[in-house]
Image (cartoon, helix red, strand yellow):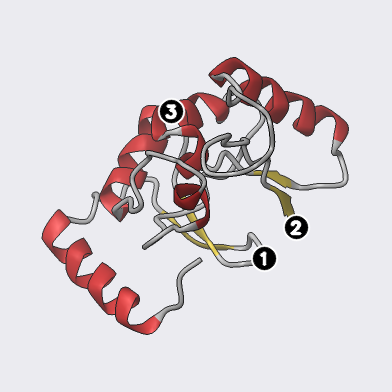
Amino acid sequence: MGFVPLAYHPEDNDIPVKHPPTGFDSLRTIAVSRIYLDNFDHITAYWVGLSMKLAQVALSYGADDLHGTIIEEHIFHMAGAKSPQLQTEAAMLKAIREAGRTPVQRNTFYEPIRILENAPAVEMTENIARSKMLEDNLATA
């Protein structure tokens, strides 16, 4: 369905690599992935590993997905990531619009559920309540 290039984090592991990939390395990986992996319909700019700002730029380098709001992420953070563990819906909508793209909520199979072209961003307080409800009812990575 999609390809998610994950950046290597050298902290907290035994692999003898001292430096994580640069932002340019990550953008180049996404661009080359789009060109060579023509059997993948979607390339994800995983904002948890890239940062939201770099993920926004990656939307112009071949990525077409930011991988959603995510409630709590453990894998990258156990490896040393310092990025936020949560993005609100309002923050995601804002980031996608700032990148010049139209936000689309999709299901697991990348089928559009709703296009949020003119929808206002959800207020933070409403999103916190939703996040708490989801947190109580969903497993985390």
Q: Are marks 1 and 2 in contact (CB under 8 Å)?
A: yes
3 or 2: mark nearer the eye? 2
Which amino acid type is shown beneath numbered disc 1? Phe
**Disc 3/disc 2 C-alpha distance (Å):** 23 Å
In the rendered image, which quarter contains the N terminus?
A: bottom right
Of the numbered discs in the image, which one, if any, rests on residue 99? 3
Rendered view: 6 above or below 127:
above
**Residue at the spot 65% in from the left edge and 20% down from the top edge:** 25
**Residue at the spot 85% in from the left edge and 38% down from the top edge:** 37
Q: Mark 1 — residue? A: 109
Q: Residue furthest bottom?
A: 137
**Residue at the spot 55% in from the left edge and 20% down from the top edge:** 23
Rendered view: 6 above or below 115:
above
Rendered view: 115 above or below 19:
below
Of 135 and 65, nearer the camera is 135
Assess disc 2: are there few (<14), some (14-19) or many (≥20) residues with their C-alpha within 10 Å of its C-alpha. Answer: few
Say whether disc 1 or disc 2 marks the residue closer to the N-terminus.
2
| Residue 43 as seen in the image, left or right of residue 130 | right
**Disc 1/disc 2 C-alpha distance (Å):** 7 Å
Disc 1 on helix, strand or loop? Answer: loop
Which amino acid type is shown beneath numbered disc 3? Ala
Disc 2 on helix, strand or loop? Answer: loop
